[in-house]
Amino acid sequence: MIRDPEHEKMPRKQLEELQLKRLQAKVKEVYEKVPFYRRAFKEKGVTPDDIKTLADLKKLPFTSKLDFRDNYPYGLMAVPLEKVVRIHSSSGTTGKPIVAPYTAADVDMWAEVMARSLASAGMTKHDVMQNAYGYGLFTGGLGFHYGCERLGATVIPTGAGNTKRQIILLQDLGTTVITCTPTYAFILNETAKEMGVDLRETKLRLGICGAEPWSEQMRKDMEEKLHISAINIYGLTEVIGPGVSVECEHKNGMHIWEDHFLVEIIDPGTGEPLPYGKEGELVITTLTKEAQPVIRFRTRDITNLSVEPCKCGRTMVKMARITGRSDDMLVVRGVNVFPSQIESVLLEVEGVEPHYLIVIDRRDVFSAEDLEIWIEVSEEVFSDEMQKMERLEKKLRAEMDSVLGISARIKLVEPRTIVRTEGKAKRVVDRKELPNSGLITK
Ligand code: AMP
Ligand code: ZN
């Protein structure tokens, strides 16, 4: 369902006029109110008056995760703290956490884009949504919560974890929609099975999953195992949290709510903007956020944009599934490899579970040699004869070789060797850290 047709179906020309107007105002605002941006603009020799068209966006400096760290905690804010009604935070990859302050208007805008997103995913006010994203500092829990209430549907704020209780509530309260990370959807299914519950026999019909990379094969697997339709949703703390983009019923790319988020794709190496259709790093400028607007934020997420008209009638561009993060990329003997590619190979092969770990011997940040992939096999395969395991291992090795162009060692491990996470899964680990990583059960 289209919640806000005026914006979601706005003719592109009109949308671009709206974006330009909002961009000019926001750029002026951060220039006046945030010393960090004023300095960065000056270094690039650009002033707000230089933004005459949307193409002028490329004259502005980028913002990175590092800038968040350097200006921790309140250095990027454009309003006084007394205007802030809430603060979220994400752990970031190193050092200080990332801080995300919201004004009342920001919370309202977020609830609205989330309500739009849930509607786009196929939810209506008649649904009962069990929200198994983590509540607290993480944006997932409250982001979905507010969106659901705004839509007028029923939210059950279980948060992540306590999986057995989740299954009981899901059955008893007639949950129709589950919202959680893709990893957690599989944990729910496993636990249900252990409890003798078949999720296919419940009222569950829809899953809205995101916050971590997953693949098309994983979607198929989830849809079959849980007997649901699974929808991909994307967002990030620095920008707003979940609700930046989401799929419609056609499931071929996530519509970006471009009246609030202006997007570009750049070459991660050179920083040059790339045309629609080309794969590169997603860069986002917030057009309406008050407390902490971001200008040209480098997400590190690799995707491509499509402006082709969608059958749903929305005019907003679609971003493809995230294929990796530019800082997650492994360079194995000169070949670029993303964990997501490894995952897609695994999911094509019968008898293996979507639980895996990439064990590397890291020599420096971006290179990895002697790649070893730990893969869990299903109970059936594991209890079968040795020969079958060997055949499977050989098959996986050959597939990796032909699809990724790398030869990796394959280590088949018994069910439940790899620890299940309730939040985002960690897939790459240095061999030295493995014993104390908490990622394996023994
Ligand atoms: P955080 O700010 O901690 O919520 O993390 C945001 C990051 O999670 C994004 O930059 C992406 O790398 C990842 N992420 C969020 N949603 C998705 C999704 N649907 N597919 C792939 N990665 C995602
Ligand atoms: Zn669509």
Image: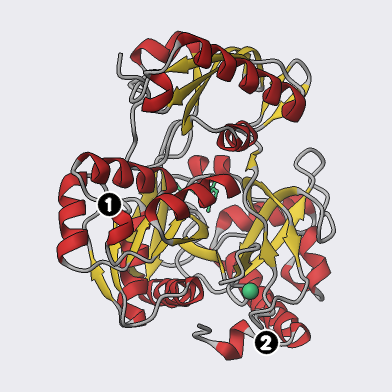
Q: Which residue is mark 1?
A: 198
Check the picture and name the quadrant holding the C terminus.
top left
Name above or below for residue 400 compared with residue 390: below
Quadrant position of residue 183: top left
- Image point 22% across, 39% down: which residue? 194
* 304 lies left or right of 37: right
* Residue drawn where x is 41% and y is 75% of the image: 123
Label 1 CB sits under 8 Å from any ligand 1 atom: no
Q: Is residue 214 left or right of residue 326?
A: left
Assess disc 1: are there few (<14), some (14-19) or many (≥20) residues with their C-alpha within 10 Å of its C-alpha: some
Q: Determine the CA span between mark 2 and mark 1.
A: 43 Å
Q: Is residue 322 visible?
A: yes
Where is residue 133 shown, x and y percent of the image?
Answer: 33, 53
Q: Nearer the viewer, residue 379 or 333?
A: 379
Image coordinates for residue 366, horizontal then vertical, percent = 66, 22
* Residue count near mark 2 (Cα–Cα under 10 Å), binned few <14, some 14–19, many ≥20: some
Residue 178 marker: none
**Residue at image x 68%, y 53%?**
282
The disc, 2 or 1, on the residue closer to the chain's N-terminal end is 2
**Residue found at x 73% / y 28%:** 404
What's the residue type where badge 2 is placed? Met
**Badge 2 vs badge 1, beta-carbon distance below 8 Å:** no
Question: Residue 114: x, y in percent?
Answer: 44, 71
Query: Which of 263/31 is in front?
Result: 263
Along the line of sight, which residue is nearer the eye, 122 or 332?
A: 122
For residue 215, say whether it is visible.
no
Q: Amino acid at mark 1?
A: Asp
Judging by the rendered image, the residue that carries numbered circle 2 is 10
From the viewer's perspective, is 37 left or right of 95?
Answer: right
The extreme bottom residue here reads 6
For residue 397, above or below residue 289: above
Element on which disc 2 rests:
loop
